[in-house]
Amino acid sequence: MLCCKLQTIFTYVMNLETDIEASLTVLHSGGLILYPTDTVWGLGCDATNAAAVAKIYALKKRSDEKSMIVLLSDEHDIPKYVTQPDPKIFDYIKGIHKPTTFIYEGGINLAKNMIQGDGTIGIRITNDLFCKKLINRFGKPLVSTSANISGYPAPALFEDIDVEIKSGVDYIVQHRQDDVTAASPSAIVKLNADGSLTIIRP
């Protein structure tokens, strides 16, 4: 019994490593990945590469005036991409359990087509094991946007993702494709310049 459990763990770790290595190759070359997040399945790329970001907008048939968010693995990385992060936000992040995207003022060090005209940027600290490992290994934030054509519902399961999306990426992560628990998008909170919070999506 113990041998079987160890073999299962070993297989899981090796498969995860295969996905990470393949994803890193694509990300470094400016390509797109289709990957599971702590919310719905997402389209991802290097959030500092404007050409890669443009590919996602094109695949989703979405105006670049509509924002996409970035994933980070640790809240301590936020100051690298936001000009004036309020220290109170770190305590707030630690106190929440639902995946939550924060809209910050003054986005920096990201692709220009990731930062909105008003200078804001959406950032989520992911708790998903695969995403954390991938971001840590990549050393940069990842774009995360629902894997759907603009105007259509976000896919709750891998099997719900449109074939056009699947055929438009450079790598599809194998991890968690067989999940049967439907996922939902994150909450969205705006961090205002005065330090107050506005709930956009609970």
Image: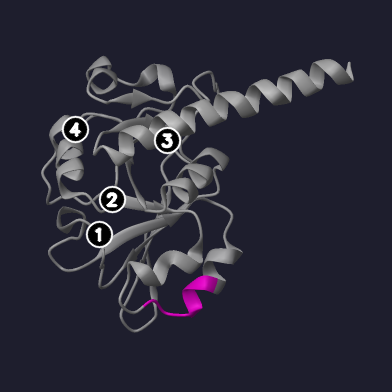
- Residue placed most toward the observer, 127 or 157: 127
Q: Earlier in the sequence, mark 4 or mark 2?
A: 2
| Tags 4 and 2 touching, CB below 8 Å | no
- Which residues, given as a range, are shown in magenta? 85-90
In this view of the protein, can residue 201 be seen by the observer? no
Residue beneath disc 3: 40
Residue beneath disc 2: 47
Q: For the point 33% across and 31% down, which residue is it?
A: 33
Give SS at disc 4.
helix
Distance between mark 4 and mark 3 Cα atoms: 15 Å
| Tags 2 and 1 touching, CB below 8 Å | yes
Q: For the point 25% across and 54% down, which residue is it?
A: 48
Give SS at disc 2.
loop
Q: Earlier in the sequence, mark 1 or mark 4?
A: 4
Distance between mark 2 and mark 3 Cα atoms: 18 Å
Distance between mark 2 and mark 1 Cα atoms: 6 Å
Quadrant containing the N terminus in the rendered view? top right
For discs 2 and 3, the disc positioned in front in the rendered view = 2
Q: Which mark is residue 88?
A: none
Question: x, y (%) of residue 34?
Answer: 35, 29
Q: Earlier in the sequence, mark 4 or mark 3?
A: 3
Residue beneath disc 4: 60
| Residue 32 is covered by the magenta coloring | no
Q: Residues within 10 Å of mark 4 (few under 14, many from 20)?
A: many
Q: Amino acid at mark 1?
A: Leu
Residue beneath disc 1: 110
